[in-house]
């Protein structure tokens, strides 16, 4: 097991440089989770670790320059969250940690989950598999669901696979999905207007940094339009979403710091398996349900919930 | 003298050193051995406890899942109850986090309900699972544990199937994510760096504190077959081998019976034998300190022994060489100091006895050997100057000057030799002190330096014997044509006696009137005559026949002194060639001749 005290005893004078790449805007909840993890491993920012933050909000292309910079500069580790990983695929000189909703094997980042084999490793949230599950849970909470609006950031890696899985699940459950993609933050308002005009019975939002940043706007929109909503992460429910089902983001980023520590102490990313979350949380916001006039007491949703917001 | 090859110093040093170091070494060796044995037993027990505890917890984990699964197969399947079963399944998922999905299979082997955390649920008649090994296994044994498989070559999974008590209750097949055992294994710490791990029958890693090893194992990256077989071969006791990370470890295995997995508890050799190493270090330090201490002590002790002995040896050598005033100084406050004191006393006594023997040697010039022996054990101040009553005897050959004028030196020396021998023998016999020979004269003292009873008697007898001995010699000399006579004078009175002279040449002598008187009487005496002074006469006249020869003027005396002569028992058989008696003595001689026959009869001795 990792023993940070011993690591620092050897390399007390060393200050590690970590690049944090994100297409998200600040405040960044994932960054906070990662920082928390680093602190737990004994790193103190400014003393033995420096986090250099590179944000290109909604524009992964802008991060390509940072990737070039990465190759030249003396950087110990790069951490990319979500779509930012796309810009990093060409980087082979620096270890890169990622946190993806999609499948890293499909994206060509790693050879296999067990043995990544390159300079990439990290965590996948299995959003692809959970996509169908989310439709199913929404249907269970709201059995009259016929038409489902699906809001998705088209720039998100693996977004197309997620949409396909969602579409298949909807078909099985006799739901007509309405695909509303958008690219970048500036297209979000237009997409929401589109959803509002569609007269859907419910709203499914793919988990993604962009929708995460604008979660308040989206959840407010859903309540305003009396749309039962389903999200991927608990943070959406805290912001007013009705349901969310997925791995705990903060815990994942917290855990990602463990890999960062191991890589900084000399382990190769090639031998560090891509981590998959084991626990999936179902969050139910009863306050939102009340606002929407939904009675969830009869469905199986409540006893299955890991956390109920009342 | 050759020195012995090995000195006492080395012997003492080695003996003392060994005496301290040997028990120390022995003690340390015994302690190290026992500590090693105890540590080994302790380590064995510790690993056993940890491995057993891990195996128990794994068993509890799988048993818990089995028992929970039992809940959903309690009621028989009946029409239209799929939804109830679905709810059961969902509740079970809620209850047991490790279950990822489960299938409820009706008695015919058809899947009726499928619920999952990840995939979509299914209800209603599904796939035919009657040929599934899980279903077959559960039907046969009520409970079936499937082999471990790695989903997407990474996450370890396992299927558990449980059949209801009645066949009608159907079978539940659950997919278990074994990553959750990680919590159990990660919590096990053996010492600081020891841990436990779980391996399945085919040597694949199921659980390890470093979860990434387990996740990698699906791709076949970690092979623990070797470790497993080595540790299993030890059959429950700890064995030293190479761990999964290539480091030397001490490992022990226990089987988790129901699932057939092997739990291996291991601790790095470095840590496992830490206490032994520490104990060995301690022992070594103790031995090192002991050796330094022992050599210091032995050196000091040996020096304390050896120094005084060398001093004694040197002392003996010097005293042997005659330096009797040499003294040995040892202050060790023990037997050696005592020895030195005794030694010094001995040297002192030696010096005293040497002085004594020197004195005796000097005495022997004057005394008979028996007297000398006597002196040796008496007052050392015997020879010191003192005033005392002595008897002085002077003897002198008559006609010697004429003889020396005529005779050859050889003959003179032969005569003197015989003469001295005779005088010496007589003097020794009567324990007199021969003071000196002076050519043909001789001086003998009685009562000095050794006192004796009746010195006058002893002196007169000595004089008589001396006269007789010389007279018998004179007879033989006469036969050879040498006409020599012998006269003796004897006197008694106080005189100063003592040693006189300077270093290397000391004489014992007497000074006083009595000496002069005796010398004078000797001069007056005719051949064969012994002239006696009144004092001696007074002492001996009871036993010795003496006859007065009239008053004689003596040099140094104010008035004439009556002189006596010993009455002779024998006649002179020869006549001297010419008269040698001084004129004033002649009348006395004539008178003596006259009375000689009368007195012969009274000479009793």
Image (cartoon, helix red, strand yellow):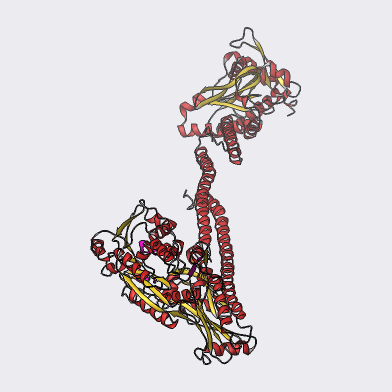
Q: Is residue A141 above or below residue B408?
A: below
Query: Residue A36 magenta-drawn?
Result: no
Quarter of the rendering containing residue B363: top right
The total of numbered circles placed on residues is 0
Quarter of the figure that contains the N terminus of chain A: bottom left
Residue at image x 58%, y 67%? B46
- Image location of residue B542, percent across then percent down: 76, 22
Q: Give, as a single range, the part of the protein colored magenta.
A: A262-285
- Image location of residue B537, percent across then percent down: 71, 19
Identify which residue, B203 or B242, lies in the foreground. Answer: B203
Residue A162 seen in this snapshot: no
- Image location of residue B258, percent across then percent down: 58, 80
Residue at image x 39%, y 68%? A207
Judge from the rendering whether residue B8 lies leftward or rightward of residue A57; answer left or right. Answer: right
Extreme residue in the top direction: B558
Query: Residue A264 magenta-drawn?
Result: yes
Identify which residue, A270 or A199, lies in the foreground. Answer: A199
Quarter of the rendering containing residue B395: top right
Residue B18 seen in this snapshot: yes
Identify which residue, B376 or B568, lies in the foreground. Answer: B376
Judge from the rendering whether residue A81 lies leftward or rightward of residue B530; answer left or right. Answer: left
Identify which residue, A23 or A139, lies in the foreground. Answer: A139
Judge from the rendering whether residue B532 lies leftward or rightward of residue B113; answer left or right. Answer: right
Q: Is residue A142 above or below residue B377?
A: below
Quarter of the rendering containing residue A215: bottom left
- Image location of residue B292, percent across then percent down: 49, 49
């Amino acid at each position: 097991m990792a023993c940070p005290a011993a690591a620092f005893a050897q390399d007390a004078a060393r200050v590690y440089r970590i690049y944090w790449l994100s297409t998200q805007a600040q405040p960044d909840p994932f960054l906070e989770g990662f920082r928390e993890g680093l602190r737990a491993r004994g790193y103190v920012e400014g003393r033995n670790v420096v986090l250099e933050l590179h944000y290109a909000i909604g524009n992964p292309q802008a991060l390509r320059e940072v990737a070039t910079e990465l190759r030249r500069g003396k950087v110990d580790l790069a951490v990319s969250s979500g779509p930012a990983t796309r810009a990093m695929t060409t980087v082979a000189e620096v270890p890169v940690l990622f946190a993806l909703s999609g499948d890293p094997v499909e994206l060509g980042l790693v050879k296999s989950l067990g043995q990544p084999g390159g300079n990439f490793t990290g965590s996948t949230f299995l959003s692809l598999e959970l996509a169908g599950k989310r439709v199913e849970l929404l249907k269970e909470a709201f059995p009259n669901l016929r038409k489902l609006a699906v809001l998705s950031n088209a720039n998100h890696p693996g977004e197309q696979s997620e949409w396909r899985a969602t579409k298949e699940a909807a078909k099985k459950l006799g739901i007509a999905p309405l695909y509303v993609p958008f690219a970048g933050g500036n297209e979000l308002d237009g997409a929401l207007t589109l959803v509002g005009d569609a007269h859907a019975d419910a709203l499914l939002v793919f988990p993604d940094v962009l929708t995460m940043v604008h979660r308040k706007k989206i959840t407010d929109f859903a309540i305003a339009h009396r749309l039962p909503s389903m999200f991927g992460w608990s943070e959406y429910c805290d912001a007013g979403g009705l349901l969310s089902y997925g791995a705990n983001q903060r815990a994942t980023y917290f855990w990602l710091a463990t890999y960062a520590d191991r890589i900084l102490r000399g382990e190769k990313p090639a031998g560090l398996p891509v981590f998959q979350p084991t626990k999936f949380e179902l969050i139910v916001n009863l306050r939102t349900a009340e606002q929407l006039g939904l009675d969830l007491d009869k469905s199986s949703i409540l006893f299955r919930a890991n956390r109920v917001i009342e | 003298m050759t020195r012995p090859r090995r000195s006492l110093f080395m012997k003492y040093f080695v003996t003392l050193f060994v005496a301290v170091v040997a028990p120390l070494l022995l003690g340390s060796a015994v302690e190290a051995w026992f500590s090693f044995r105890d540590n080994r037993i302790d380590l064995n027990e510790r690993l056993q406890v940890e491995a057993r505890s891990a195996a128990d917890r794994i068993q509890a984990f799988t048993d818990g899942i089995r028992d929970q699964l039992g809940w959903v197969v309690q009621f028989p399947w009946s029409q239209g109850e799929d939804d109830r079963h679905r709810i059961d399944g969902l509740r079970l998922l809620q209850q047991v986090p490790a279950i990822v999905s489960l299938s409820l299979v009706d008695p015919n082997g058809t899947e009726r309900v499928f619920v999952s955390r990840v995939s979509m649920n299914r209800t209603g008649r599904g796939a035919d699972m009657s040929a599934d090994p899980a279903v077959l296994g559960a039907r046969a044994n009520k409970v079936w544990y499937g082999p471990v498989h790695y989903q997407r070559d990474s996450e370890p999974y396992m299927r558990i199937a449980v059949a209801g008590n009645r066949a009608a209750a159907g079978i539940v097949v659950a997919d278990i994510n074994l990553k959750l055992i990680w919590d159990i294994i990660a919590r096990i710490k053996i010492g600081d760096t020891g841990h436990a791990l779980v391996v399945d029958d085919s040597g694949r890693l199921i659980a390890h504190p470093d979860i990434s090893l387990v996740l990698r194992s699906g791709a076949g990256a970690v092979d623990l077959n070797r470790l497993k077989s080595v540790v299993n071969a030890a059959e429950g006791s700890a064995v030293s081998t190479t761990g999964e990370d290539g480091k030397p470890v001490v490992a022990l295995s226990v089987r988790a019976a129901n699932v057939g997995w092997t739990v291996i508890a291991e601790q790095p050799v470095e840590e496992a034998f830490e206490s032994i190493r520490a104990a060995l270090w301690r022992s070594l330090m103790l031995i090192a300190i002991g050796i330094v201490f022992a050599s210091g002590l032995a050196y000091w002790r040996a020096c304390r022994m050896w120094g005084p002995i060398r001093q004694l040896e040197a002392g003996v050598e010097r005293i042997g060489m005659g330096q009797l005033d040499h003294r040995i100084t040892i202050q060790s406050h023990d037997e050696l100091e005592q020895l030195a004191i005794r030694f010094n006393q001995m040297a002192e006594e030696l010096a005293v006895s040497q002085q004594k023997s020197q004195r005796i040697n000097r005495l022997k010039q004057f005394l008979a050997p028996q007297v000398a022996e006597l002196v040796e054990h008496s007052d050392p101040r015997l020879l010191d100057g003192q005033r005392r009553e002595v008897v002085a005897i002077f003897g002198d050959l008559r006609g010697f000057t004429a003889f020396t004028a005529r005779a050859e030196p050889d003959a003179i020396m032969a005569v003197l030799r015989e003469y001295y021998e005779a005088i010496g023998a007589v003097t020794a016999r009567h324990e007199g002190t021969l003071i000196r020979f002076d050519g043909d004269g001789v001086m003998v003292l009685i009562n000095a330096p050794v006192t004796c009873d009746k010195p006058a008697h002893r002196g007169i007898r000595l004089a008589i014997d001396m006269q007789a001995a010389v007279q018998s010699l004179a007879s033989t000399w006469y036969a050879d044509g040498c006409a020599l006579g012998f006269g003796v004078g004897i006197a008694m009175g106080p005189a100063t006696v003592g040693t006189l002279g300077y270093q290397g040449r000391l004489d014992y002598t007497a000074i006083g009137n009595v000496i002069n008187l005796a010398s004078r009487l000797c001069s007056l005496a005719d051949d064969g005559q012994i002239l006696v002074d009144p004092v001696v006469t007074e002492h001996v006249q009871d036993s010795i026949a003496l006859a007065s020869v009239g008053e004689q003027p003596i040099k140094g005396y104010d008035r004439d002194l009556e002189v006596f002569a010993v009455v002779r028992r024998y006649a002179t058989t020869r006549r001297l060639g010419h008269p040698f008696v001084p004129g004033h003595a002649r009348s006395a001689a004539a008178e003596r001749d006259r009375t000689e026959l009368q007195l012969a009869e009274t000479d009793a001795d």
